[in-house]
C-alpha cells in the first residue's frame, strides 16, 4: 500500500535541443533564463561570467539580446571578460579592477584597486602616469583588457576587412 504509484518527469527543450544534448554553455544559458523568467524578485542579481562555454555568435545573438531585455526589469551585475557583453549589452557602469604589480601599479601599493564609469568616459592613455587606473579612461581600459588593446582591435578589424556601405 505504501508503494509510489505516480512519477513525474520533465523534458527541457530549447531551440530544438533537449537539455541532455546541449553544450555546457547552452545549458548554463537556459538555466539562467529559467531562473530569471520564473523569479518575481526585483533585487539585483550578480552573474559571474555568463559567457563561459558560449561562442561569440551565441553571446551576441542570444545572451546580449536577453540581458538587454531583462535589465529593464531588474538590475544585473555581471563579471565578464567579453567585450561583446560590455559594449553590446549597453553597460551603464563598468568597474575595472587592477592587481598591483611591477608593471601595473596601484595607488599606495594597494593590492587591488578599482575604478568605475561609463564607456563614454574616454581619456587617451598618459604614459607619464604610473598608476594604471588613473592613466586612461574607462573606454580605453575596456579596449585594452577586453580587446587586447587598440592595436589588436585594429588588426582584427583589418583581417576581417568588413566594409560597411
Image: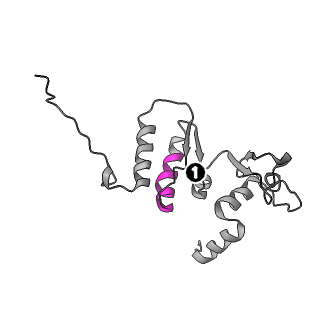
Query: Residue at 57% of width from left, 51% of height from top?
Result: 89
Query: Residue at 87% of width from left, 57% of height from top?
Result: 129
The residue closer to the viewer here, 73 or 113, is 113
Query: Residue at 74% of width from left, 53% of height from top?
Result: 138
Q: Give the range drawn in magenta.
A: 54-68
Residue 162 in the figure: left or right of residue 111: left
Query: Residue at 60% of width from left, 77% of height from top?
Result: 159
Q: Is residue 105 above or below residue 5?
A: below
The residue closer to the viewer here, 36 or 127, is 127
> Magenta stretch: residue 28 in it?
no
For the N terminus, the image quarter is top left
- How many numbered marks, from 0 up? 1
Residue 161 in the figure: left or right of residue 105: left
Q: In this view, does 131 lie above or below 155?
A: above
Q: Which residue reaches farthest top?
A: 1
Task: Report if residue 108 is visible in the image.
Answer: yes
User: Could you say where residue 132 lies in the image, as x and y percent from the top left?
Assistant: 80, 55
Task: Report if residue 18 is visible in the image.
Answer: no
Q: In which quarter of the image is residue 157?
A: bottom right
Q: Which residue reaches farthest right?
A: 128
Q: In which quarter of the image is residue 163?
A: bottom right
**Circle 1 is placed at which residue position?**
89
Q: Quadrant of residue 2?
A: top left
Amino acid at each position: 500500500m505504501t508503494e509510489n504509484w505516480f512519477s513525474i518527469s520533465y523534458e527541457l527543450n530549447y531551440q530544438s535541443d533537449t537539455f541532455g544534448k546541449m553544450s555546457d554553455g547552452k545549458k548554463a544559458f537556459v538555466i539562467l533564463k529559467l531562473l530569471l523568467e520564473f523569479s518575481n524578485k526585483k533585487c539585483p542579481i550578480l552573474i559571474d561570467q555568463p559567457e563561459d562555454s558560449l561562442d561569440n555568435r551565441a553571446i551576441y545573438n542570444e545572451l546580449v539580446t536577453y540581458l538587454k531585455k531583462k535589465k529593464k526589469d531588474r538590475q544585473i551585475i555581471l563579471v565578464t571578460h567579453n567585450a561583446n557583453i560590455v559594449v553590446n549589452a549597453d553597460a551603464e557602469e563598468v568597474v575595472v579592477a587592477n592587481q598591483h604589480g611591477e608593471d601595473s601599479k596601484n595607488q599606495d601599493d594597494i593590492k587591488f584597486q578599482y575604478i568605475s564609469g561609463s564607456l563614454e568616459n574616454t581619456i587617451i592613455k598618459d604614459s607619464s602616469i604610473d598608476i594604471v587606473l588613473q592613466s586612461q579612461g574607462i573606454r580605453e581600459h575596456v579596449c585594452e583588457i577586453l580587446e587586447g588593446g587598440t592595436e589588436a582591435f585594429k588588426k582584427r578589424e583589418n583581417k576581417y576587412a568588413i566594409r560597411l556601405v
